[in-house]
Amino acid sequence: MQDEKNNKMNISSSEVTMLSNELTYRKYLLNKDNMPNRDNVRKFFQKLTKPEYIALHIIKETEEKADIYSGKTYLKELSEKMQLPIRQISKMVAALRDRGLLTWAHDGDGSEGTYVTITESGKKLLAEEEAVLKSYYGKVIEKFGKENMIQLLQLMKQLETVMSGELEEMMIASGEIREDEEGSAVYE
């Protein structure tokens, strides 16, 4: 069946192996924390980890765009956007709250939703981190090309969608997850 798919795409098994190995290697290099020059990039995040930066950015962006929620970002929404379990999001939010970068509260008795809002200190630190990233990535984008960067990001998003779908199909086939009546994955 897999060879049938490969033949339809006019791609050989050896080409699939070569491309998958190259993709794995490139992902490895992008995520490797101790490669040359990675320490310099890691210095961008001296006061925040990458996940903390992303969380604060999402929270600030939600506050600016969503008047309906009065600046609230619900933990469930943050969990979905960051593709992390609620337990991990809660741990990170607690650390950010303890540092005074956000507030954490709940609607009603808590059963209606737990949410966070960014503090002025959080906005200030986020702005500092954004300035450093903007300086670095501005130069990268200038050299790589704006259109190339846009195309790369669009392709990465498409690739992530395809990869997630394939992984879900494999997990369904192995019995690790099942589909509900609407065809959505249900993790057991």
Image: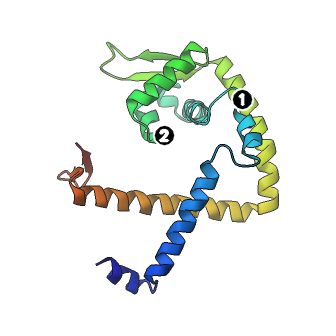
Q: Quadrant of residue 2?
A: bottom left
User: Is 7 positioned to the left or the right of 73 in the image?
Assistant: left
Residue 147, position as x, y percentages in the image: 71, 64
Residue 120 - label: none
Which residue is rendered at x = 44% and y = 42% of the image?
Answer: 83
Query: Does dot 1 land on a helix, a strand or a loop?
Result: loop
Q: Badge 2: how crowded within 10 Å, few (<14), some, or many (20+)?
A: some
User: Is 123 positioned to the left or the right of 3 in the image?
Assistant: right
Q: Amino acid at mark 1?
A: Gln
Quadrant location of the N terminus in the rendered image: bottom left
Q: Amino acid at mark 2?
A: Met
Comparing 121 with 163, the one in front is 163
Residue 30, position as x, y percentages in the image: 63, 52
Q: Earlier in the sequence, mark 1 or mark 2?
A: 1
Which residue is rendered at x = 42% and y = 40% of the image?
Answer: 80
Comparing 98 with 23, the one in front is 23
The answer, for residue 74, to whether it is visible in the render is no
Residue 182, position as x, y percentages in the image: 21, 53
Q: Disc 1 versus disc 2: distance between alpha carbons?
A: 21 Å
User: Is 149 positioned to the left or the right of 13 in the image?
Assistant: right
Which residue carries the number 1 mark?
46
Which residue is rendered at x = 57% and y = 56% of the image?
Answer: 27
Which residue carries the number 2 mark?
82
Q: Badge 1: how crowded within 10 Å, few (<14), some, or many (20+)?
A: few
Residue 136 versus residue 18 in the image, above or below: above
Q: Are marks 1 and 2 in contact (CB under 8 Å)?
A: no
